[in-house]
C-alpha cells in the first residue's frame, strides 16, 4: 500500500510517500510497524491525538481495518481561514 505523509509529518519522516508491503490488520498496526523502524517514525507518531488518517482518501481512525486499502495518508488536523 502507498503511505503518504503531509505537512510536519512529512518533515519528521523525511519522505513524502513510501510503499509498505506487509500484512497488517489495522492502521494502528501500521503505525507500530513504522515506529519500530527508526527514531524519525517514533517522533512523527509520538502523539496520535495531533494526527489524522485517511484511507483511500476518506477520513478514518487508527482502529480502522486495512483490508483492501491501497492508500493511507497521515496529516495534522487542518484549519480554515
Image (tube, rainbow, N blue to C red):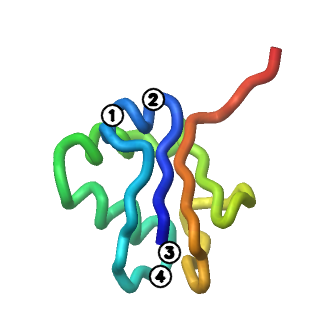
Residue at 32% in and 63% down? 32
Element type where label 3 sits in the image = loop
Distance of label 4 from label 3 (alpha carbons): 4 Å
Would residue 1 appear left or right of 80 to someone viewing this image?
A: left
Q: Earlier in the sequence, mark 4 or mark 2?
A: 2
Q: Which mark is residue 50?
A: none
Element type where label 2 sits in the image = helix
Give 6 or 46, whichever is nearer the viewer: 6
Distance of label 4 from label 1 (alpha carbons): 25 Å
Q: Which residue is mark 3?
A: 26
Q: Does the residue at mark 3 contact the one at mark 2 (Cβ under 8 Å)? A: no
Q: Which mark is residue 25?
A: 4
Distance of label 2 from label 1 (alpha carbons): 6 Å
Q: Which mark is residue 12?
A: 1
Would residue 78 appear left or right of 63 to someone viewing this image?
A: right
- Image position, residue 47 (x, y; %): 42, 40
How crowded pointer 2 is (Cα within 10 Å; few <14, some 14-19, many 20+) is rated as few
Residue farthest along the left direction in this orientation: 38
Residue farthest along the right direction in this orientation: 81
- Image position, residue 18 (x, y; %): 38, 58
Between circles 4 and 1, the one closer to the viewer is 1
Q: Does the residue at mark 2 contact the one at mark 1 (Cβ under 8 Å)? A: yes
Between circles 4 and 2, the one closer to the viewer is 2
Amino acid at each position: 500500500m502507498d503511505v503518504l505523509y503531509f505537512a510536519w509529518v512529512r518533515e519528521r519522516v523525511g519522505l513524502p510517500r513510501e510503499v509498505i508491503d506487509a500484512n497488517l490488520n489495522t492502521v494502528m498496526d501500521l503505525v507500530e510497524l513504522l515506529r519500530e523502524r527508526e527514531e524519525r517514525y517514533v517522533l512523527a507518531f509520538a502523539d496520535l491525538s495531533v494526527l489524522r488518517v485517511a484511507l483511500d482518501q476518506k477520513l478514518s481512525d487508527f482502529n480502522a481495518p486495512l483490508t483492501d486499502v491501497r492508500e493511507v495518508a497521515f496529516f495534522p488536523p487542518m484549519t480554515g481561514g
